[in-house]
Amino acid sequence: MAVMLLATACNRDERNLVGDYSYKISGEVILTDADGQETHQFIHRNGQMNILKDKSRKSGLLITMNEMNGGCYTILADIQGDTIVLPPYEFSTNILSVDDFPSIGSDNTPSLVYHVRAAGSGRPNGQMLILREHWTGIQSGDPSITLKAPEITILAEKN
């Protein structure tokens, strides 16, 4: 009986997470090259997040992130107790430059593509998900330019 109750509770948590969300990303990105480091804030990074139960894994979720500026990637996440774990995954993102000052998320400006490796975790909070990630990466045109983001916050609200 206790095992059935525990299994039902886990399934209920997964079902509560499944759905469509609107999300916004915030945080600082540190770009490093031969001349030193520059720290930059995110500007207008948001989109749609879809969470599905990954039926091929017992406590797995399939999270798709569709950015408003066109980027899209998928994360295979796990549920461990009341925590959503985002194991390491990779994606590419644009960092856009305005008058030689890099920013993230601006439109109609030249861009540089970075290949990013991310990982993190989060928790549901009512109709919200609060996820925290850390990123590392390199610029696609010049791998000597690196990207580091020690704390990226993703706030997602269920639609």
Image (tube, grey):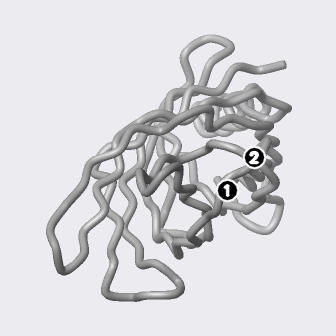
Q: Amino acid at mark 2?
A: Glu
Q: Amino acid at mark 1?
A: Gly
Residue that lies at the very extreme toward the left in this rendered image: 36
Question: Can you say whether 120 is above or below 113 in the image?
Answer: above
Image spot of residue 113 (x, y percent): 58, 72
Question: Can you say whether 48 is above or below 117 in the image?
Answer: above
Image spot of residue 51 (x, y percent): 78, 43
Q: What residue would you read off at disc 1?
A: 60
* Residue at position x 44%, y 45% in the image: 121
* Residue at position x 47%, y 33% in the image: 26
* Residue at position x 53%, y 76% in the image: 115
* Residue at position x 31%, y 62% in the image: 31
**Quadrant of the rendering where the C terminus is positioned:** top right
Image spot of residue 25 (x, y percent): 55, 36
- With 68 as the anchor, is 133 left or right in this view? left
**Quadrant of the rendering where the N terminus is positioned:** top right
- Dot 2 falls on a residue whose secondary structure is strand
Q: Nearer the viewer, residue 101 or 84?
A: 101
Eye-nearest disc, 1 or 2: 2
Q: Residues within 10 Å of mark 2 (few under 14, many from 20)?
A: many
- With 75 as the anchor, is 67 left or right in this view? right
Q: CA distance from mark 1 to mark 2?
A: 22 Å
All told, the count of numbered labels is 2
Q: Nearer the viewer, residue 151 or 87?
A: 151
Residue 155 found in image quarter: top right
- Dot 1 falls on a residue whose secondary structure is strand
Q: What residue would you read off at disc 2?
A: 67
